[in-house]
Image (cartoon, grey):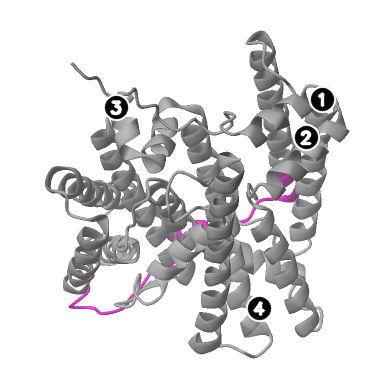
């Protein structure tokens, strides 16, 4: 009688999985800044670039547009606009990151966001629904759409590309049916969603308080992680690194809050995007469900043999992806103060996917971070904003530049995978 060799799911994020990772663990044992710096350098050389390429790219983009615009791009008023404009697309991209981590795709996020916007417009102006009812109906529709996708994918084996492409066409048609009688709907300027998305900003002291809370949260989380690793007999970084990290985050956030407060301040919708990223990042990195996503994205069969309910993972991720598309559609409509037949169409799908990939999420599944959505959407919004400032507005140059940046991101991802594979084999 023969037995199959045991299959092991890919390690959870942060678990050493190669010779380079083990060497990094040994370097961290000396509990020094030098050891941490050497470990970081080894990871970069082995292809584990993380968010480094997109951060460097963002610095280059901002510096270039600041020069070309004659010092206008980095003015407080423009950065406030940039942050608010990023909120809606960023929420859509958060859901895209989740489905990409599984190695799948959702091509209908734009249509779903447009459907949510149409429900918002008709609900507010025609049916006179309260806003909470509109949110519940929209999220319910998004959840049903994601459940449909997940069921067709897991039960019938319909590829995610096909099922979501069908959804793109179908739900765009539903949106046209809903808006058929009006075509374009102007949202009341005093409605909650318009004020939330376009005209609500934090007071300076509120922004400073959030900065302190964020840095304190990072410090407490890192200290608890150090304590757990120490009790488990694992290596821990130098204590000074923990405090330096928290201090750098605190100073950075305070500077950003102060600079934005020179104009209108930090947009509430952008803060909502950051909170959504933080919450989803916690669930993806700190829960069993999140580790299952990485495992399924790394190897479906290995995850199944390890006892993971892959069907539940797929369905839950498709539901969340559609729900985030709904939230993004509502916020985008509120920012534009109108709902039209073109809401959610055009380049919304491609920009959401491009933002996730540009931010560092792999198209091949199993690698990436929810923070990719935030970084990627800032890059894409910066490109559109900067081109408009330097009088290169219009779709043509924006599509070309975004396409080139996306291609570079995919090339970096492919080279990183090849480098990690060669180091792992070594």
Q: Secondary structure at mark 3?
A: helix
Q: Is residue 421 magenta?
A: no
Reading the image, the residue beneath label 1 is 238
**Quick check: 343 left or right of 26?**
left
Q: Residue at x 51, y 28 (%)?
A: 286
How busy is the neighbourhood of tag 4: few (under 14 within 10 Å), some, or many (20 plus)? Answer: many
Reading the image, the residue beneath label 4 is 386
Disc with the residue nearer the chain's start (3 vs 2)? 2
Q: Is residue 246 above or below residue 65?
A: above
Please state, as top left, top right, bottom left or bottom right, where the C terminus lies in the image.
top right
**Quick check: 421 left or right of 49?**
left
Disc with the residue nearer the chain's start (4 vs 2)? 2
Measured in 3D between alpha carbons, the distance from the residue under mark 3 to the one under mark 4, in whole angstroms, is 49 Å
Determine the image quadrant of residue 58: bottom right
Q: Nearer the viewer, mark 1 or mark 3?
A: 3
Q: In x, y percent, where is residue 202? A: 66, 51
Measured in 3D between alpha carbons, the distance from the residue under mark 4 to the one under mark 2, in whole angstroms, is 31 Å
Q: Residue at x 65, y 16 (%)?
A: 229
Residue 419 or residue 31, whichever sits in front: 419
Q: Nearer the viewer, mark 3 or mark 4?
A: 3
Give the numbered dot on residue 246: 2
Q: Which residues are magenta?
A: 179-208
Reading the image, the residue beneath label 3 is 305
Q: Is residue 201 magenta?
A: yes
């Amino acid at each position: 009688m023969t037995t199959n060799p045991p299959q092991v799911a890919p390690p959870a994020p942060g678990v050493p999985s190669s010779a380079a990772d083990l060497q990094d663990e040994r370097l961290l044992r000396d509990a020094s800044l030098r050891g941490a710096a050497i470990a970081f350098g080894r990871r970069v050389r082995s292809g584990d670039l993380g968010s480094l390429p997109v951060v460097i790219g963002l610095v280059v983009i901002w510096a270039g547009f600041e020069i070309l615009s004659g010092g206008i791009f980095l003015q407080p008023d423009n950065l406030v606009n940039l942050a608010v404009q990023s909120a809606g697309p960023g929420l859509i991209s958060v859901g895209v990151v989740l489905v990409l981590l599984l190695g799948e795709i959702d091509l209908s996020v734009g249509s779903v966001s447009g459907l949510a916007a149409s429900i918002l417009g008709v609900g507010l102006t025609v049916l006179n629904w309260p806003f909470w009812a509109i949110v519940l109906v929209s999220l319910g529709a998004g959840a049903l759409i994601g459940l449909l996708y997940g069921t067709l994918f897991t039960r019938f084996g319909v590829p995610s590309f096909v099922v979501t492409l069908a959804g793109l066409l179908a739900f765009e048609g539903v949106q046209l049916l809903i808006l058929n009688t009006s075509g374009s709907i102007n949202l009341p300027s005093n409605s909650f969603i318009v004020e939330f998305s376009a005209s609500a900003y934090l007071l300076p002291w509120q922004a400073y308080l959030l900065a302190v809370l964020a840095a304190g949260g990072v410090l407490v989380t890192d200290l608890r992680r150090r304590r757990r690793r120490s009790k488990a007999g694992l290596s821990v970084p130098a204590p000074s690194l923990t405090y330096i990290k928290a201090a750098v985050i605190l100073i950075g956030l305070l500077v950003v809050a102060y600079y934005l407060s020179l104009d209108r301040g930090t947009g509430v919708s952008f803060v909502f995007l950051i909170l959504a990223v933080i919450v989803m990042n916690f669930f993806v990195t700190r829960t069993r469900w999140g580790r299952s996503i990485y495992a399924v994205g790394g190897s479906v069969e290995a995850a199944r043999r390890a006892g993971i309910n892959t069907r539940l993972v797929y369905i839950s991720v498709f539901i969340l992806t559609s729900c985030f598309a709904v939230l993004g559609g509502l916020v985008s409509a509120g920012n534009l103060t109108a709902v039209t037949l073109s809401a959610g169409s055009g380049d919304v799908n491609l920009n959401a996917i491009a933002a996730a990939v540009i931010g560092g999420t792999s198209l091949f599944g199993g690698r990436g971070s929810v923070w990719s959505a935030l970084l990627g959407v800032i890059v894409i919004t910066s490109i559109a904003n900067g081109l408009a400032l330097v009088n290169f507005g219009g779709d043509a140059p924006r599509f070309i530049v975004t396409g080139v940046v996306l291609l570079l991101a995919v090339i970096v991802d492919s080279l990183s995978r090849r480098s990690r594979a060669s180091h792992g084999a070594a």
